[in-house]
Image (cartoon, grey):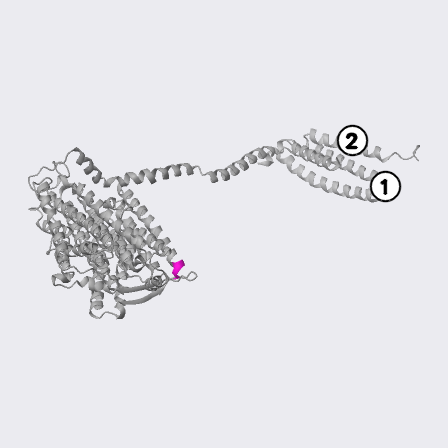
């Protein structure tokens, strides 16, 4: 079983190396075959490992193996260790299956690209890094995968780097996540200094044994890890990179938003759950950051005019929902939502990619879309399935079950449960609203931009598979009160701490589920009124808004001005500091010495005339001077 | 015997100093390399005279020994100096020390 786990990151890594070294000599078809093949192979391996894990669970719910030793520095000797438990199994299946489908889609989407071997090399490396991150048994190895993910996101967001804006977006993503990464590295150091190990399982045991809840080092370490997680997962206040990350090709966006990258933060918090439980203030911060991001992202998504930006804000907001779930202790619900979200968000991104690549001029603007239902029936079906799952339409979609679990987890939180629940409900309503706003704006109404081409088989298959999954994955997580078995939660139960105990209110679960269903259904109803067929759509939110409302809409469209705020608060002082340091004061002193030496040299050089008699006079004068000094 | 006894050492030293200054002035003033060599000879002999006079004043032979050293050194110096002058006389139109300034390049 553990051999399969070792194979999982190795296959895409091999693909990346092969494409990186020999990609230039490959034909486009060969490069695509290697890239997609290695991803599919990784997915099959992950499924096999998951099947083996479920059919014969290892004792203690986890199996660990050391593949190779790495380095040693004093007491710190991280090894390339792999650990397969319920959480790692669930994550690796999500990452590889969704990743493989995205690779397949990309094979057609990027077909005309010149540097396709490079593209697939980076995509494979992305997948491999994410698998290292997920399977690592040691925090140092996890950090290796963590940085690998960051690097690949930079490379892929800036894949079309000839356009300066794309390169800027890539740089922004890299720098903003770097803030979190630095904090996380500090967190690892704090953990190592206090606990003497960075191997996850012993570290968590030791932490629970050594620290009492609320101990200062535990709070500091958890807070630093949270900063890292917030950076990678685009949570408030490090969320600003995500909307700009749309500069990358659409399959890259799908990979970043669904299977890899943004889920890394959620995974980290879930993986280190016992540590976070020792730090109640940080748990509160997780929930607050999640709730804020959920609402900010949902409101901003509602006001976007770019189809991909809408989905980007949507990702931010949904990951916020996962953080909210983590913060209230609904660990399994968060991971279940991560899985369903990975499926339907990949589906939404890929369908959006199919839409834009079908339209003339690769149109991204929602205001120039419309009436595509008849032209692109498959894409319409897929996108609607994705939007329904995102909105969490009751019973038939996967999003409903995972969201319902989070809502009931929020209600059952130890403190202020009703408030968390209200925030999640508001977020869910907004989510449902913008999901169907997209559906109506893109597919209903009259046609505004002609369709230039239709997606081929390599694009259609992932859409169909993901569409089917988006509707059915939820069947793995039917709650007990509905007479089902929450299989995902059961898989995770050995790897995650138990949620806070619920006080049993008969019928409470069903009432909460009814409320969630109502929130989900409100979205399409309101969206149909505002943006349904036959509505004027000059403004993003529709005509009825007054001037005051428009101000709010503009604020939401710009992501509530966080970019401008950061530019003002951090960018400008930074720039002036750089300008001041440009004439490096320290350098100035050293350069001054060099200049003085040069001046003296020039002066002294004048004395070397080559005239013998001057030299003789100099020698005579010097001797006379010396004599005078000695004698007088 | 010189009437009035031997001259005092200070006279010989003053003479040596005058000779030395003469030689130095010639060295600085003349541009012809041959004359400059001659000027150096004069300066060397001035130093030799000072040694001899000082030796006589102290009643020791060391001063005269030093003079032999100076003589030897002067011979060596002239040998090297004349060889250089001979070389230069072929390279330069006239034996002008200032024209040899381009040796510095």
For the residue pair A29 and A193, the one nearer the viewer reads as: A193
Residue A183, horizontal then vertical, whole percent: 35, 51
Q: Which residues are magenta?
A: A192-196
Q: Is residue A222 left or right of residue A543?
A: right
Q: Is residue A432 left or right of residue A578?
A: left
Q: Quadrant of residue B86?
A: top right
For the residue pair B26 and B84, the one nearer the viewer reads as: B26
**Any part of residue B24 in sight:** yes
Residue A591, horizontal then vertical, whole percent: 49, 38
Q: Quadrant of residue A63?
A: bottom left
Decide: is B38 above or below A176.
Answer: above
Which residue is labeled 1 in the image? B58
* Mark 2 crowd level (few <14, some 14–19, many ≥20, 10 Å Cα): some
Residue sitting at x 29%, y 64%: A83
Residue A105, horizontal then vertical, whole percent: 17, 53
Which residue is labeled 2 in the image? B18
Magenta: main secondary structure: helix
For mark 1, give the secondary structure: helix
């Amino acid at each position: 079983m553990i051999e399969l786990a070792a194979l999982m990151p190795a296959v895409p890594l091999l693909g990346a190396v092969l494409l990186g070294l020999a990609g230039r000599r490959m034909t486009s078809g060969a490069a695509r075959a290697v890239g997609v093949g290695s991803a599919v192979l990784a997915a099959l391996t992950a499924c096999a490992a998951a099947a083996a894990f479920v059919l014969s669970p290892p004792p203690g719910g986890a199996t660990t193996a050391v593949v190779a030793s790495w380095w040693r520095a004093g007491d710190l000797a991280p090894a390339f260790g792999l650990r397969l438990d319920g959480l790692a199994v669930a994550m690796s299946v999500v990452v590889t299956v969704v990743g493989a489908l995205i690779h397949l889609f990309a094979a057609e989407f990027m077909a005309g690209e010149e540097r396709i071997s490079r593209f697939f090399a980076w995509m494979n490396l992305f997948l491999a890094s994410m698998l290292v991150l997920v399977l690592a048994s040691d925090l140092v190895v996890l950090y290796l995968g963590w940085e690998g993910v960051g690097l690949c996101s930079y490379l892929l967001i800036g894949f079309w780097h000839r356009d300066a804006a794309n390169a800027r977006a890539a740089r922004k993503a890299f720098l903003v996540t770097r803030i979190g990464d630095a904090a996380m590295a500090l967190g690892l150091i704090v953990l190592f200094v206090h606990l003497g190990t960075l191997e996850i399982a012993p570290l968590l045991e030791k932490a629970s044994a050594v620290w009492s809840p609320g101990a200062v080092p535990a709070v500091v370490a958890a807070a630093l890890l949270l900063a890292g997680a917030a950076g990678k997962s685009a949570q408030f206040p490090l969320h600003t990179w995500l909307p700009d990350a749309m500069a990358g090709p659409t399959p890259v966006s799908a990979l970043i938003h669904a299977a890899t990258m943004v889920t890394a933060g959620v995974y980290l918090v879930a993986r280190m759950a016992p540590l976070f439980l020792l730090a109640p203030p940080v748990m509160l911060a997780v929930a607050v950051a999640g709730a804020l991001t959920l609402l900010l992202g949902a409101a901003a998504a509602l006001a976007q005019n770019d189809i991909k930006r809408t989905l980007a804000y949507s990702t931010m907001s949904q990951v916020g929902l996962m953080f909210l779930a983590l913060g209230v202790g609904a660990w399994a619900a968060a991971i279940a939502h991560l899985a369903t979200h990975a499926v339907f968000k990949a589906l939404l991104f890929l369908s959006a990619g199919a839409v834009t690549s079908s339209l003339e001029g690769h149109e991204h603007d929602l205001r120039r879309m419309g009436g595509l239902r008849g032209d692109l029936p498959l894409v319409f079906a897929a996108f609607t399935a994705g939007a329904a799952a995102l909105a969490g339409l009751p019973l038939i979609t996967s999003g409903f079950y995972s969201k319902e679990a989070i809502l009931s987890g929020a209600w059952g939180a130890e403190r202020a449960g009703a408030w968390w629940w209200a925030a999640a409900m508001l977020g869910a309503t907004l989510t449902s609203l913008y999901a169907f706003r997209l559906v109506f704006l893109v597919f209903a109404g009259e046609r505004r931009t002609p369709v230039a081409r239709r997606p081929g088989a390599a694009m259609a298959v992932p859409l169909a598979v993901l569409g089917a999954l988006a509707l059915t994955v939820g069947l793995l997580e039917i709650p007990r009160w509905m007479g089902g078995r929450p299989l995902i939660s059961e898989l995770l139960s050995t790897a995650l701490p138990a949620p806070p105990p619920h006080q049993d209110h008969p019928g409470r679960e069903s009432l909460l589920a009814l409320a969630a269903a109502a929130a989900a259904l409100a979205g399409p109803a309101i969206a149909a009124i505002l943006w349904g067929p036959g509505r004027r759509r000059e403004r993003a939110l529709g005509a009825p808004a007054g001037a005051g409302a428009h101000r709010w809409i503009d604020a939401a469209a710009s992501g509530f001005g966080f970019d401008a705020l950061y530019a003002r608060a951090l960018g400008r002082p930074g720039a002036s500091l750089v300008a001041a340091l440009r004439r490096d004061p320290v350098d100035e002193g050293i350069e001054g010495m060099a200049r003085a030496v040069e001046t003296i040299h020039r002066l002294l050089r004048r004395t070397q005339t080559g005239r013998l008699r001057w030299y003789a006079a100099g020698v005579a004068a010097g001797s006379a001077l010396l004599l005078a000094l000695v004698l007088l | 015997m010189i009437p009035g006894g031997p001259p005092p050492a200070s006279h010989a030293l003053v003479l040596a100093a005058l000779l030395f200054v003469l030689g130095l002035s010639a060295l600085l003033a003349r541009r012809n390399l041959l004359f400059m060599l001659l000027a150096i000879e004069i300066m060397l002999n001035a130093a030799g005279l000072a040694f001899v006079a000082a030796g006589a004043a102290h009643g020791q032979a060391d001063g005269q020994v030093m003079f032999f050293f100076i003589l030897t050194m002067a011979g060596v110096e002239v040998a090297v100096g004349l060889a250089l002058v001979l070389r230069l006389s072929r390279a330069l139109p006239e034996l002008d020390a200032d024209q040899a300034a381009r040796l510095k390049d």
